[in-house]
Amino acid sequence: MGDTIIVEELRKRYGELAAVDGVSFRVAAGEFFGILGPNGAGKTTTLELVEGLRKPDGGRVSLLGEKPWPRNPRLLPRIGVQLQANSFFEKLTAREQLETFASLYGCGKAAVAEMLDVVGLADKADTREDRLSGGQRQRLSIACALVHRPDVVFLDEPTAALDPQARRNLWDVLRAIQGEGRTIVYTTHYLDEAEALCDRVAIMDRGRILALDAPAALVRDLDAPTHVSLPRGVLSASQAWQLPGVQEVTEGELTTVIATRSPTPVLAALVERDALEGLSVRKATLEDVFLRLTGREYRA
Amino acid sequence: MTTFLSLSRAMFLGFFRDRVAVFFTFLFPLMFLVVFGLLFRDVGQSRIPLGVVGSGPVIDGLPADAVEQKRFESLDAALEQVRAGDLPAVVFEQDGQVTLRYAASDAARAGTVQGLVGGVVSEVNLRASGRPAAVRLQAEQVEASSLKAIQYLTPALLSWSVATSAVFGAAMTLVSWRRRQVLRRLRLAPVAPLTVLTSRLGVAFSVALLQAAVFIAIASTPLFGLRLSGQWWLAVPLLAIGTVAFFAIGMLAGSFAKTEEAANAVANLLVLPMAFLSGTFFPIDAAPRWLQIVSNTFPLRHLTDGMLDVMVRDQGVGALLRPGAVLVGFAVVLAAVALPLFRWDDA
């Protein structure tokens, strides 16, 4: 089976700004692919170029074996899109919104009822869109993108501006969609979320892809030390240095932090000393990857 | 077809749940109808009040359907009222002598009174001479029914409100959908732009028909007493063409405007001056010639004329030709300009 999406050397300029500056990637069928980066990194423009909302200045996009630009009617029924702003019809209820979108694709009321269930809005079906909460609106928006059962789903920052509880809810919805075998391409500026959801991620900054791999592989390749924190006073600095494989010991006001590339022997030694009380382990994350790649702290 | 219907339904529901839109589409123009209708209720049919002093064949011969006699005991008392502007004129008849005194300040009615009284005097003289009349005048009014103000106001205000809601409907929908990214979303759905457009147009036409129904229903109550002429249903095809023409104007406005506020302002700027110069609130026939020419360049003028012809002037299909052709012309030209300007999004 070929790749669902092939992007080669994609470029898009807005005046002086190179919004997308030579981006290439491939997405396999059934993959959950994340594009992440800070605001203004070029995530949305990349997505719009792949969807066919914009004309690329250079490069090539193949989506399901077709060219998305200019507007390609053969492609449209096979893709589902959630835009960054919730594009709803005015003053319609959740059910009416879905019914309208469903009918554009020739889908009936059964599909609507089912989709309301999938996104957990069955009890809000008759609530008007402008009276839903932020999380409910996002879920409705995703439902509108999915109601015709597309092969490829594009979601532009579906979890932006949601409270943590609503974000977690949405994660479950997204996982369920992937479970049905659909290809998902989504953008986010939450690195932790990409780590939790995506098969592979492309980290973008200033119009370029800096790294592209499975989140775990990116972190592993970073070869960053694991940080083991203990409450201050459990071990003295010199005792800490005597543990096997310790690279660095930092004493803070409340904690002693031990950096190591071989956490297992360190932890085993701590178990021997019965020093697990209040211990925490922090592995490197995508944030550390971003820091390494760009030389600056990640700010969403 | 299902796409067309479901989009229409979505827009229809959205429209009727928007209280502000419903107010400005239905209640606001109706307020004009009610206020003007009550204000001018008696204008068309009113008889001219005329002071009479004394008696004789001329006073007896004054036509009762045109003149409302006000009897005075003395000429001075009557003249007092003429001077005060309460009466346009007074007739004093005594021993075969008739005197007409009129207020020059009310020239129009004074002229009418002079003509009326003069006619009666001639007739009395003719009869006295015992000779047959050399020339006979037979006068009948042209319109089927009365010339009451409501007969004019209903078609004119209806034309205006249909035009307004078509322009606003098109402009606001376009701008609001572009801002809310509904158009971008529709661009990514398998739906033809023409389907989106025609379904909104269909909604505009349904709204126009509803406006017509409400207008006619209210104007036909005994309070206002509208009487439609024979082929009034010809208003329906005329409203359809009118809706398309004004919808195209709205699309043009919506192509330029970036915000709802701007679209609102532009639409008002287009429709309101047009209404004043197209005979919406008062007949434009008496206006100077150059104003008539300006007026004839407006589509609303032609819609108003056509609506008056078919609704109250008892005209047939032929009356549709000119306004129909003009409105179709406007629609075609404006659509040809507006369609290439159509944008799916702001960026």
Image: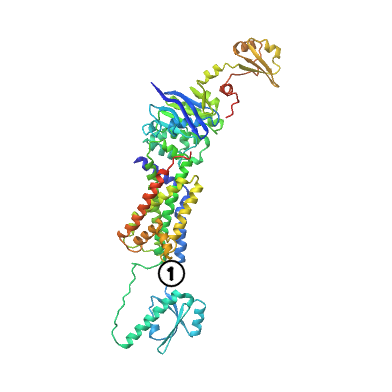
Question: For mark 1, does the 10 Å Cα neighbourhood hold few (<14), some (14 to 19), or many (20 or more) residues?
Answer: few
The quarter holding residue A239 reads top right
- For the point 28% across and 84% down, the residue is B132
The number of callouts visible is: 1
What percent of the width, then of the height, locates residue A127? 48, 40
- For the point 41% across and 37% down, the residue is B187
The type of residue carrying mark 1 is Val
Q: Is residue B121 at least partly visible in the picture?
A: yes
Which residue is the extreme one toward the bottom? Answer: B95
What percent of the width, then of the height, locates residue A295? 60, 23
What percent of the width, then of the height, locates residue B68? 42, 77
Q: Is residue A91 at least partly visible in the picture?
A: no
- For the point 45% across and 46% down, the residue is B254
What percent of the width, then of the height, locates residue B247? 40, 50
Q: Quadrant of the N terminus of chain B?
A: top left
The quarter holding residue B43 reads bottom left
Local SS, label 1: loop
Q: Name the chain under label 1.
A: B
The quarter holding residue A144 reads top left
Taking B47 as reference, is B20 above or below it?
Answer: above
Query: Is B171 left or right of A235, judged from the image as shown?
Result: left
Taking A45 as reference, is B341 above or below it?
Answer: below
Taking B138 as reference, is A13 above or below it?
Answer: above
Residue hosting label 1: B43
Q: What's the coloring here?
A: rainbow
